[in-house]
Amino acid sequence: MVDTLGLLLGVMVTAADTGDRAAAQVLLRRVADGHHRLALVWADGGYTGSLVEHCLATLALVLAIVKRNDDLRGFVVLPKRWIVERFFAHLMRTRRLVRDFERRTTSTEAMIYWSMTLLMTRRLARPGPERG
């Protein structure tokens, strides 16, 4: 889960037999507990159904589903989806995350945190116009 700048708010790597909606409930609980000002979450079409009601009733979060228009053909940039895709691109710059080399899900989560630490320190160290 990332914020609008593409910075990591929370990560949860699960086994392949765990459904995305079930894992999303746990992850959303963790992130909502740690980020009290969080009010709106964008998700793709795979998270429709009871998860929307669960977020509103249990976590007081609005889960907005970003849907693809079925009338359009070919590649279409979906609103807000590019933020997550850019995050995935940053993760793929860390060569170890290109393939699934890890045996444990905790190792994969640690590698994702490490990759984001590299990205965030690069952003902090980069001189900007306000830093001179």
Image: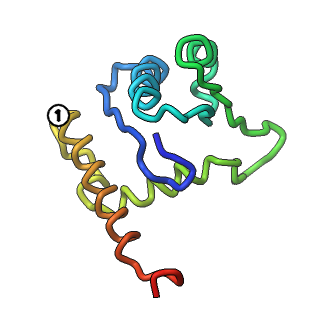
Instruction: Report which quarter residue 26 is drawn in.
Output: top left
Q: Which residue is mark 1?
A: 104
Residue 19 picture quarter: top left
In the picture shown, does residue 75 fall above or below 33?
below
Please give the count of numbered marks on the rendered protein: 1
Q: Position of residue 88 (x, y in %)?
A: 44, 53
Q: Residue at x 35, y 71 (%)?
A: 122
Task: From the viewer's side, name the closer residue of 113 and 77.
Answer: 113
Find numbered disc 1 in the image and state the secondary structure of the residue it sits on. Answer: loop
Residue 43 seen in the figure: no
**Which residue occupies 77% across, 48% down?**
73
Q: Residue at x 69, y 37 (%)?
A: 66
Q: Relative to the observer, which residue lies in front, 109 or 5?
A: 5
Q: Position of residue 109 (x, y in %)?
A: 26, 41
Above or below for 27 versus 116: above
- Crowdedness near tag 1: few (<14), some (14–19) or many (≥20) residues, C-alpha within 10 Å: few
Q: In the image, residue 60 lies at what x, y percent?
A: 59, 19
Q: Could you say where residue 49 lies in the image, as x and y percent from the top left? A: 63, 15
Q: Is residue 80 above or below residue 34?
A: below
Q: Is residue 91 left or right of residue 86?
A: left
Question: Viewer-proximal residue, 95 or 72?
Answer: 95
Left or right, 57 with respect to 21, comes to right
Q: Is residue 70 above or below residue 83?
A: above
Kindly identify the amino acid type of the residue bearing the numbered disc 1: Arg
Instruction: Name the residue at the left extreme.
Output: 103
Residue furthest bottom in the image: 132
Whether residue 132 can be seen here:
yes
